[in-house]
Amino acid sequence: MELKNTVALVTGGASGLGRATTERLLAAGAQVVMVDLNAEVGQQASAELGDAAHFVTADVTSEEQVQAAVDTATGLGALRVVVNCAGVATPGKLVSRKGPLPLEAFQKVLNINIVGTVNVCRLAAAAMQEQEAEGEERGVIVNTASVAAFDGQIGQIAYSASKGAVAAVTLPMARELAASLIRVVTIAPGIFETPMMAGLPAEAQESLGKSVPHPARLGKPAEYAQLVESIVANPMLNGETIRLDGAIRMAPK
């Protein structure tokens, strides 16, 4: 699918992987609706990125707010690309010194990472189904899992469960939406330079980077965005979860 003169929606689009994806899609000629919970950061990003960048404040777990974001996108033209980057990575052991993992903490991570992702997918897909096809497809949905879906570490009970679920829904979602000419692909990033990673000391970041076999560094958000563009461009990529991780396999802790 060609990106020029299309409309894309990116959740978590104001920072990290989402911001890099927004920039990449804009450079390819798309109009992009950035969806983020942080209004200040989102409005600043929109102002910096120009007239083709549009910002909507929304909680991905809210049907009403996500529908408003989708409506904003379809108001600009045919919504062809959706990229789900919104997510949280709150750590927590099943049983720590403080006792069992609080159930509400577990539920919060799953609610944002998997329920939020599915919420965006279902509302965006419904809009895409009403559009005329462009060539042999109507749209592409790219979701974000994590290597934690496969190599979950101690303290990643909720995160691994949520990202494993994102990977798990990829194929059934792609199979269902195939009849509507909509593709679904998931990216499972390894250790990337993101706002969450920026909170760690420089020494810790360097150590994590060296744990990657090749290239022995943290992934760059632009490399995630590059893969998004490749997925959109290649019509045979569908129903798959792609590891983008420099061949890392995470240690237990």
Image: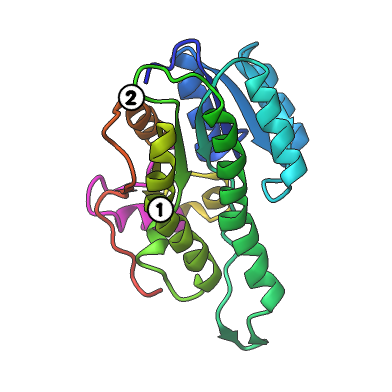
Residue 207 occupies quadrant: bottom left
**Residue 64, position as x, y percentages in the image:** 77, 42
Callout 1: few (<14), some (14-19), or many (20+) C-alpha neighbours within 10 Å?
few
**Residue at point 33%, 24% (across, down):** 233
**Residue 225, position as x, y percentages in the image:** 42, 32
**Residue 167 at least partly seen:** yes
Please, is residue 218 above or below residue 166 in the view? above
User: Which residues are the magenta region?
Assistant: 204-221
Residue placed under numbered mark 1 in the picture: 172
**Residue 190 at least partly seen:** no
Three-letter residue code for mark 1: Pro
Please, is residue 243 above or below residue 48 in the view? below
Three-letter residue code for mark 2: Ala
**Residue at point 29%, 54% (across, down):** 212
Query: In the rendered view, does 125 fall on the left or right side of 105?
Result: left
Q: Is residue 212 magenta?
A: yes
Q: Could you say which is closer to the camera, residue 10 or residue 168?
A: 168
- Asked which secondary structure carries label 1, the reply is helix
Q: Which mark is residue 233?
A: 2
Please, is residue 5 above or below residue 240 in the view? above
**Residue 205, position as x, y percentages in the image:** 44, 53
Q: Contact (CB < 8 A) between labels 2 and 1?
A: no
- The tally of labels here is 2
Callout 2: few (<14), some (14-19), or many (20+) C-alpha neighbours within 10 Å?
some
- Asked which secondary structure carries label 2, the reply is helix
| Cα–Cα gap, marks 2 and 1 | 22 Å
